[in-house]
Amino acid sequence: MPIRHGRRTVGAYVMTPQGVRFQPATDVTRIVVTAVTTVALTVVTIAIAVAVRRPPAIRSVTMGPGGWVSLKGTALPPMRDSVAPSRPWWARSLRARRLVVER
C-alpha cells in the first residue's frame, strides 16, 4: 500500500505474515538533483574566489648570498619626512618615550 505526499511517494506499508511495517522510499531523482546543485554551487564559488583573488603585492622574495633580502617587482618605499609624525594618543597618555639607539 503506497503512501504519497502530494505527487511523490514517501514509502509504503508492507503487509507480511509477521505484521505490517513501513518501508520508506528512496527518491533517487531528488538525491541526484541535490548532488548536481551542490557541485554546481561549489564550482561557481571556487571560480568566483579565483577571479576575485588579488595578485600578490610583490612578485618574489629571495635571499642573497650575504643574507640580504631581494624583493623583485616592488616600487621603492616612500621617503620618510624629516619631521617626526605625531604620536598616538596612547603614547602621549602613557608618556611613552621612543626607543632610539644612539651611537
Image: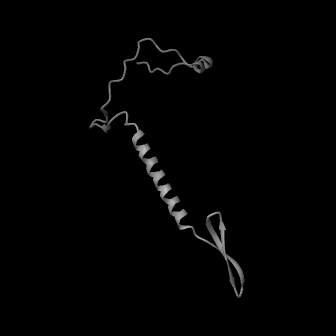
- On screen, residue 96 versus residue 3, left or right, reads left
The quadrant of the picture occupied by the N terminus is bottom right
- On screen, residue 48 versus residue 58, left or right, reads right
Pinpoint residue 36: horizontal percent, then vertical percent: 48, 58
Along the viewing direction, whichever of 61 and 102 lies nearer the viewer = 61
The quadrant of the picture occupied by the C terminus is top left
Query: Which quarter of the figure has residue 51?
Result: top left
Pinpoint residue 2: horizontal percent, then vertical percent: 65, 74
- On screen, residue 68 versus residue 90, left or right, reads left
For residue 102, above or below residue 35: above
For residue 42, above or below residue 8: above
- On screen, residue 46 versus residue 59, left or right, reads right
Residue found at the far front of this picture: 7
For residue 31, above or below residue 41: below
Residue found at the far left of this picture: 65
For residue 14, above or below residue 103: below
- Residue at point 60% right, 21% down? 90
Residue found at the far bottom of this picture: 17
Along the viewing direction, whichever of 41 and 22 lies nearer the viewer = 22
Pinpoint residue 53: horizontal percent, then vertical percent: 41, 39
Along the viewing direction, whichever of 68 and 87 lies nearer the viewer = 87
Q: How is the image coloured?
A: one colour
Q: How many marks?
A: 0
Query: Which quarter of the figure has residue 8?
Result: bottom right
